[in-house]
Image (cartoon, rainbow, N blue to C red):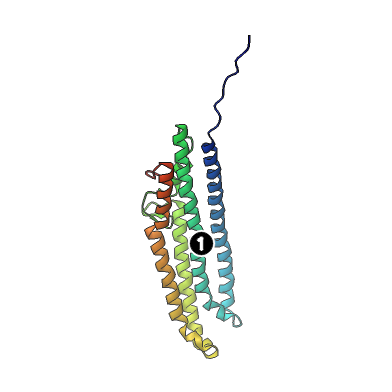
Amino acid sequence: MSIQQPTTTPPDPSLEILHKQLERMRAMLYKYSELFYKLIVLGVVALVLMAAACMTNSFRAVALIIPFFAIYLGVQSAYFLSYVVFARVYATGIEKRINRMIADDALIAHRLEAAYLYPLDGAQFAGVPARLGQSFIGFITIHFWLTGAAVIALAAYRAWQLLPALTLQFPPLRFYFPALILWSLLHLFYLVWYFGARRDERRIEKLVSEAYATSYERA
C-alpha cells in the first residue's frame, strides 16, 4: 500500500520576477535617497568653507562662485529626487500587482509611504504635498529651499560689494549679474515645469498601470 505524497503548487514564475523587480526598486530608492542627503551634507560643508574664504582678502573672489554652486546643489539634488520618485512609483505598481495576485494586502510599504510622505495621486511639488500640515520630510525640504535662497542672496550681495574692484582686474565680470540672473531663471523655470507638470511621473504610472492592470488611486 503506497502512501500518496501531498502535492505542492509550483511557485508562479511571474511572482518571483515581480519580487526581484521590487527588491531592485527598493534598493534604488534607498540608494538615491542616500545620495540626496549625502549631497546636501557635503554641499553645506563646502558652502561654509567657501563663505569663510570669501571673507578673506586673498580668496574674496570665491563669493562669485557661491550662487552658481548653490544652484548646482539644488539642481543635482532634484535630479536624485527624480530617481527616488521613479523607484517609488514603480515599486508601488509592483506591490499592488503582487497583492492582487496573492489576493491579500501583504505588501503595504506603498501605503505607508503615501501616509508618511505624500500620496502619488495627490497634489505635490518636488516631494512637498500641497497642504499646511507638512510631514517632517516636507518641512526639511522647504527648509532647504529657504536656506538655499538665503545663501544665494547673501553671496550675491557680497559679490556686488567686490565686483567694482574685481572687474578692473577681469573686465568680463561686468556681465556677472546678467549671467547669474539668466542662469537662475533657466533652472528655476525648468524645475517648476518638471515638478509642476509631473509628466515623467504620470508617464511611468500609465505604463505600469497598463502592464500590471493596476491603478494609482489612493496610492
What is the x, y in percent for residue 156?
47, 77
Could you say which is closer to the camera, residue 191 or residue 53?
Answer: 191
Which residue is rendered at x = 54% and y = 88% of the image?
170
* Residue found farthest to the front: 1
Q: Is residue 176 above or below residue 124?
A: below
What is the x, y in percent for residue 108?
47, 39
Which residue is rendered at x = 42% and y = 56% of the image?
200
**How dense is the environment of label 1, judged by Cα within 10 Å: few (below 14), some, or many (20 and up)?**
some
Q: Is residue 210 above or below residue 190?
A: above
Residue 118 visible in image:
no
Q: How many marks overall?
A: 1
What is the x, y in percent for residue 111?
44, 42
Which residue is rendered at x = 63% and y = 8% of the image?
1
* Residue found farthest to the right: 1
What is the x, y in percent for residue 166?
53, 86
Residue 45 visible in image:
yes
User: What amino acid is found at the position of numbered circle 1 in the picture?
Assistant: Ser
Residue 190 falls in image quadrant? bottom left
Could you say which is closer to the camera, residue 165 or residue 127?
Answer: 127
**Which residue is tagged 1?**
77
* Residue found farthest to the top: 1
Quadrant occupied by the C terminus: top left
Element on which disc 1 rests = helix
* Residue found farthest to the bottom: 168
Which residue is rendered at x = 46% and y = 77% of the image?
180
